[in-house]
Amino acid sequence: MKLNLIRRFIRWHLKSKYVNRNSIDIKTIEKILIMSNTAIGDTLFTTPAIRSIKESYPDKHIIALLNPDNYKLFEDNPCIDEIVLYKSKWRNFFTLVLKLKRMKIDLALIMHSNEPQATPLAYYAGCKYIVKIPNDNNEFNFLHHNPSIRAKQGEHFIDRRLKQLEYIDIHVKSYRMDIFIKPQWHEKFSGMFSEDEIYIGFQMGASTNSRMWFPDRWVDLANIILKHKKSWNIVLTGSKSEEFLARDFLLSVPDDRVINFVGKLDIGPASALIDKLDLLVTPDTGPLHIAAALETPTVAISVAGRALESNPRDSNVTHIFIEKPKTCNPCVDKKCKYQKCMLQITPNQVFRSICEILG
């Protein structure tokens, strides 16, 4: 109830405000706030835009608003001058407003941040210009420098972010995502991987049930892989919340060529592990985009996800996206309890894609 009152008050307080929609004079811009504080993949989609800004305007001070859960993947990015942490919701909202206000930010680019907090946060922080695309359904879009712009069907998420740069006269199409792995993260795996063997990662978990393949399919795929070549190994990746998937999998596949790292690594070393793999099999979820940023080959399996919007776009990334049509109408996506549409993807089909990449 208290949080609803905050939202109502802010909506009431801002309803009579307006912004100057004259063209942005980049010469007057000194500090740029990049707001991208949601999931790992969403922030990775933002990194091409950050790099393009720094390459075009190296004198501008770039401040990145990032999620405390994944900021370590970006803190060594040379295109980011300063990082501010904020998860979402109203907790710490007003404290953050004061902190940002002291920074005297000129321009806020809301690449991917939760509303209804993001736009009011930028406005109260004193940003002269606020750009957000798409924003047609945003209750605070009257505060955005850009007019109401609808999401374009099938448009890649990176393209949506790059569109914002057109307002500061940057017209580029760069799809390389950036992660900077710390040497100590790689050191954790010293001596674990042989150059004579192949290591295939299994990312079984996903952000929602609708994106997950069924456990028995992973087991069947593992048995095909392990039977195919003695030099092929399986590496299980995933967070602590996905440990139950690994536990059940290991009971079904008791083989010493299965290496389990699920729940055993922080986000930094987990990314370094993906960097060590020869290939990662994964749903459309964060590790897919980490692998793409590290140029680790991937086979992605998805129905609820949309390949045109989220599959790796960098031409240097070896990638196969196995996508099937939705079988339920309407698709409830995140609310799905039994993702029968994923049954369309078979272990043999995934295995053929693996062989196509590994040769």
Image: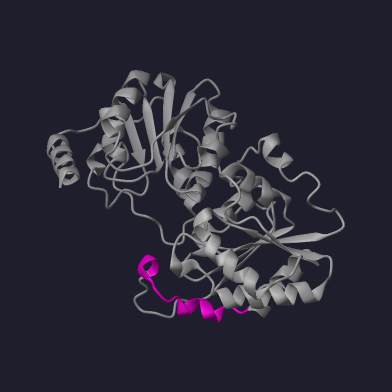
Q: Which residue is more in the foreground, 95 or 28?
A: 95
Q: Which residues are magenta?
A: 333-346
Across and down, in percent, residue 12 comes to 12, 39
- Horizontal placement of 31 versus 119: left or right? right
Q: Which residue is more in the foreground, 118 or 25?
A: 118
Please report the residue visible at 56 percent of the width from the left and 59 percent of the height from the top.
311
Please report the residue visible at 51 percent of the width from the left and 76 percent of the height from the top.
342
- Horizontal placement of 147 versus 4: left or right? right
Please report the residue visible at 27 percent of the width from the left and 53 percent of the height from the top.
137
- Horizontal placement of 202 versus 68: left or right? right
Q: Is residue 21 visible?
A: no
Q: How many marks?
A: 0
Which quadrant holds the C terminus? bottom right
**Colour treatment of the image:** one colour
Please report the residue visible at 48 percent of the width from the left and 65 percent of the height from the top.
305
Across and down, in percent, residue 332 comes to 35, 71
Q: Which residue is more in the foreground, 264 or 169?
A: 264
For residue 50, above or below residue 125: below
For residue 42, above or below residue 332: above
Magenta stretch holds residue 336: yes
Q: Is residue 152 visible?
A: yes
Across and down, in percent, residue 319 comes to 66, 61
Across and down, in percent, residue 114 comes to 34, 46
Q: Which residue is more in the foreground, 243 or 130?
A: 243
Magenta stretch holds residue 229: no
In the picture as drawn, the residue positioned furthest to the right comes out as: 196
For residue 343, above or below residue 33: below
